[in-house]
Amino acid sequence: MITDFHTHVYPDKIAERTMTALLNSNDVVHAYSDGTVSGLLRSMEKSGIERSVILPVATRKGQFDTINRFAMEINRTYPQLVSFGGIHPDDEDAGAKLGYLKENGFIGIKIHPDYTGTFIDDERYVRIISECARLGLLVVTHAGVDPAFDVIHCTPQKARTVMDRVFEETGAKKPFMVFAHLGGMFVHEDVMKYLVGTECYIDISCSFKEIMSFCETDDSDVVDVIKAHGADKILFATDSPWNDQKQTIEHFRALSGISSEEKELILSGNADRLLGSLR
């Protein structure tokens, strides 16, 4: 079962408006789906992807109920989709809200430090990530540059500091964080210095310069991270609708320098193990 571990969808009634706003926020990102659940399902069918993980983003305080009701509806309705939850660092009673997500069967949460204007090592995020580690919820975070912002709110160095602190404070025994975009978009050298070899997962969304015009990492960079970090801690991901799922999977399958066994781990085995262990 091929799993895309990083996708986004929006409710039908706001999808067009949301997609337009996001596309207008920069001049380098393009859309390959309409941002709806049905659009993602069509893309998956065309690409041979059997399961997608949906990562909602709470961009402001007070969106918790709306975002997570939609996520729960997805999880109840579509067996081939797994939606994570969303929370904002300014949300009150974050511990109770995370407990609610756990009780309702969520696997984890997505955070986006750039869209909340909050550094990953801010105490509000540290508390959220620590509570997730205690509850057994996975935390997926945008990492590195976002083309719509001038400040990097999740650098590999800050991410490493947070991981080390949370491991020490909670006694977590296994990886609890996924850093998107090869561990940090546009900051490959720092990913190699601070994150590779640690107890985290790295997804490979938006990591191929050959198929993404503004990307700065190429195939050799991706292979270097896989080899150095370990194929057992790498997750296939596309960031759909901002990349084409079919093109990304074909490009990944054609990579040289990693074995077919490593590719299968990244395409399916790691996600199967990770999602299954958290249910």
Image: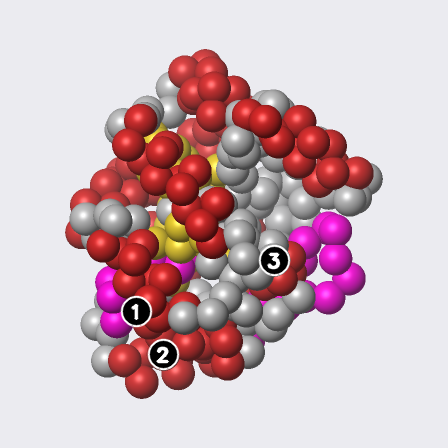
- Local secondary structure at mark 2: helix
Query: Relative to the observer, which residue lies in front, 90 or 267?
Result: 90
Query: Relative to the observer, which residue lies in front, 264 or 38?
Result: 38
Q: Position of residue 244 (x, y in %)?
A: 57, 27
- Local secondary structure at mark 1: helix
Circle 1/circle 3 CB separation < 8 Å? no
Give the residue type at disc 2.
Answer: Val
Q: Sequence order check: which comes first, mark 1 or mark 2? A: 1
- 211 vs 214: above or below: above
Q: Which residue position holds label 3?
A: 60
- 238 vs 102: above or below: above
Q: Which residue position holds label 2?
A: 166
Circle 2/circle 3 CB separation < 8 Å? no
Q: Position of residue 59 (x, y in %)?
A: 60, 54
**Side of 119 relative to 72 (left or right):** right
Q: Which residues are magenta?
A: 132-159
Give the residue type at disc 3.
Answer: Arg
- The label nearer to you, 1 versus 3, is 3
